[in-house]
Image (cartoon, coloured by chain):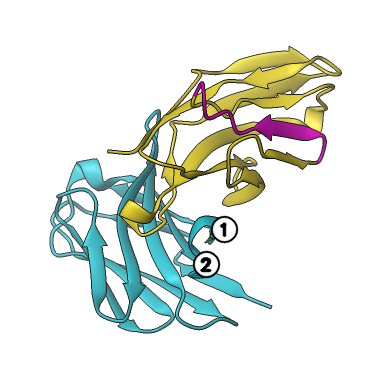
Chain colours: A cyan, B yellow
Amino acid sequence: SQTIHQWPATLVQPVGSPLSLECTVEGTSNPNLYWYRQAAGRGLQLLFYSVGIGQISSEVPQNLSASRPQDRQFILSSKKLLLSDSGFYLCAWSVQTGRLAEAFFGQGTRLTVV
Amino acid sequence: GNSVTQMEGPVTLSEEAFLTINCTYTATGYPSLFWYVQYPGEGLQLLLKATKADDKGSNKGFEATYRKETTSFHLEKGSVQVSDSAVYFCALTHSNSGYALNFGKGTSLLVTP
């Protein structure tokens, strides 16, 4: 069966520090991968999605970046965190079946920038 | 671009009450529509989905019908339970965005005994 791992679960980082959140998927090949952010009162915002290795699409311009160095690995990064980067970050994957694509979510990372 | 609008919360209901959470969408063509649920402290789980007009998705007593003419996908349940307390997200996917889920802002539901 397929599983998705996301870590760490919680993170407290100072302003200006770098960030690296990792997400890996097991049990499937060539998934679509996604990073979302859930900020208080703002719902879920799609940040990045990837349909293959090295292919990243950005939905919102900001100081975050994403990379997909391996088929089932998706990394969210920042060189210098801002206070506004605080939030709940969710990684998700889906099989590439288009209209039937159901997304499966990790447990999330609670990031607090102080 | 694609967007989803759902009713503002929080919604507070007594156990066994009828639930409706409204959701409307903006998109070209025929997106797929979803309801996801987030229980306290957890990630999101798919609740139900519909991929074409007039489809009805259903799961755990919840239902939603894809209405193309009103661009809506309202979530309903005839009798809610305390365990249904959660945040509910309406979402769509479309080929013009890599089938990434585009979510509404979420509606918090609290069911009291």
The answer to if B83 sits in the magenta stretch is no
The residue positioned 17% from the left and 48% from the top of the image is A82
* Residue A114 in view, yes or no: no
Is B63 contained in the magenta span?
A: yes
Q: For the residue labelled by badge 1, is the local secondary structure a helix, a strand or a loop?
A: helix
Looking at the picture, which amino acid does disc 1 mark? Leu
Main structural element of the magenta stretch: helix, strand or loop?
loop
Residue A100 tag number: 1
Give how far apart the Cα atoms at labels 1 and 2 are. 6 Å
| Front residue (pair B75, B89) | B75
- Residue at figure coordinates x 22%, y 54% from the top left: A14
- Judge from the rendering whether residue B87 lies leftward or rightward of residue A9; answer left or right: right
Secondary structure under tag 2 reads: loop
- Which region of the structure is painted magenta? B60-70
Q: Which residue is mark 2?
A: A97
Q: Is residue B47 visible?
A: yes
Quadrant in the rendering for residue B56? top right
Q: Is B56 located above or below residue A103 in the figure?
A: above
Tag 2: residue type? Thr
Labels 1, 2: one chain? yes
Contact? badges 1 and 2 (CB < 8 Å):
yes
Subunit bearing disc 1: A
Where does the image place residue A49, in percent across and percent down from the top left?
33, 62
Tell whether B89 sits left or right of B26.
right
